[in-house]
Amino acid sequence: MTSCPHCGCDNDAPPRSSVQHRRFFAVVAAAFDQWPHDHGFQPEDSEHLRAYLLIMAGWKEQAEVQFSKGDPEAIEAAAITLKVMMKKLGKRVFANVDMDAKKIIGVMPRSIAYMTKQEMDHFEACRIFGRIDDIICATICVESTDKLLEEAKRAA
């Protein structure tokens, strides 16, 4: 991406935009209010939805814990270990058991902090937030997230 669709910035390495950051959180909150009840993922709150959307857009970290196949105690211990590790990091974790590979895979969103460029720079934010906009539009059947925000303002 060469420019930001929300602030018009087209410098080589612009700083993250607080306007873009706030808009992202507003879009997720509006999407939470419209999230379909028959969707395979049911978020507990907008923060849970934000974690899910970041992971679905590819902005994620992954950790794995091996276990002995067929040993229920080892599987349970591995799952608890993974959840404790992830909880200590202060991030939501989504865990899947892969019985064939004998491991539990934990996936969590990466930080989107905008005060430092180390985690996500401006153009990466444009790319990830654009993917999330596409996921939201497809999931809740809205033309654009701008329309979603307009609807949320009218409803408030």
Image: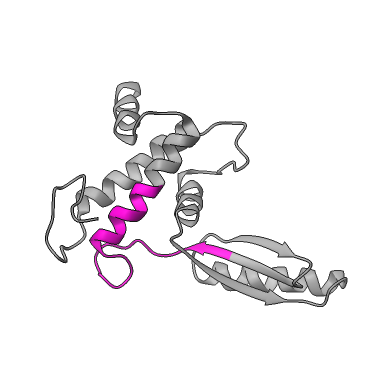
Reply above or below: 42 against 82.
Answer: above
Q: Which quadrant: the N terminus?
A: bottom left
Q: Quadrant of residue 31?
A: top left
Residue 51 picture location, percent across and down: 48, 54
Residue, x 13% and y 48% (percent of image)?
8
In the rendered view, does 26 fall on the left or right side of 47? left
Read off the magenta span: 107-131
Residue, x 21% and y 53% (percent of image)?
18
**Residue at the farthest top position:** 154
Residue 35 picture location, percent across and down: 51, 34
**Residue at the farthest front position:** 2
Residue, x 24% and y 49% (percent of image)?
20
Q: Which quadrant: the C terminus?
A: top left
Comparing 148 with 22, the one in front is 148
Confirm whether the magenta stretch covers residue 42: no
In the rendered view, does 43 fall on the left or right side of 3? right
Comparing 86 with 121, the one in front is 121
Residue 36 picture location, percent across and down: 55, 31
Q: In which quarter of the image is residue 94?
A: bottom right
Reply above or below: 116 against 154.
Answer: below
Residue 112 picture location, percent across and down: 35, 61
In the rendered view, does 38 fall on the left or right side of 21? right
Number of marks in the rendered image = 0
Confirm whether the magenta stretch covers residue 125: yes
In the rendered view, does 98 fall on the left or right side of 124? right
**Colour style of the rendered protein structure:** one colour
Residue, x 28% and y 44% (percent of image)?
23
Q: In which quarter of the image is residue 80?
A: bottom right
